[in-house]
Amino acid sequence: MFKGDEGYLENIINIILLMAVYISYVTDMRYKKIPNAVTFPSVLLGLALNILLFGSFSSGVIFSVKGLVLGFVLFFIPYLLGFFGAGDVKLFAAIGALKGAEFAFYNFLSVSVAGGIMAGVSLLMNRRFSAALKKFFFLLLFRVSVFKKLEEADASEKMSYGAAVFWGTLFNLLYFGVYKKYVL
């Protein structure tokens, strides 16, 4: 790598990230799946480009693997609870491999907020917000197994989380890439 190529490589990583989350968003909305053909190449490109970006094999791999592991862990726990599909977990691991652990952590927060907003809007639009709120408090009060209730939800009640990942990631990219770099 030549001195001065860092910005160029960061832009390539950002473009790959945007392509991966957008394709995942579209396929998740249409087919309720996030394809491995998007997530696995994104992980490999993240590793390769970060090796080039850091100028050393070990630094680039460590940066990518830390992000991959954190992204995986952050989404694996909700996956076990039934909130996300396996594709969401792999996509988040790919995001971490591309952008590192710090971005993966803040992206998790952004995506969680985006998902909460989208779920609330969806419930309001379907006039099911009060019913969902009552069900939530019932589960809390009577300690009914949340896991059992999540398994009983049919496919029409489940939200495609690819949209939240796309919008949360876009927000995070703009924040880290524009606001934090030029305003702060």
Image: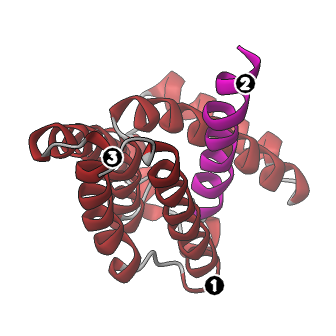
Which range is magenta? 162-184
| Secondary structure category for the residue under label 3 | helix
The residue lying furthest to the front in this view is 3
Q: Where does residue 170 sit, x and y in percent of width and height?
A: 67, 49
User: Is 162 or 50 nearer to us in this picture?
Assistant: 50
Which of pointers 3 and 2 lies earlier in the amino acid sequence? 3
Residue at 24% x, 56% y is: 47
Figure quadrant of residue 144: top left
Q: Where does residue 95 sit, x and y in percent of width and height?
A: 41, 52
Q: Is residue 14 above or below residue 116?
A: below
Which amino acid type corresponds to the residue marked 1 in the rendered image? Arg
Report the colour scheme: secondary structure
Q: In this view, does 30 lie above or below 131?
A: below
**Which residue is the site of mark 1?**
30
The residue lying furthest to the top in this view is 184
Report the magenta stretch's main SS: helix
Viewer-side label of 3, 1:
3
Q: How far apart are marks 1 and 2 (CA)?
A: 37 Å
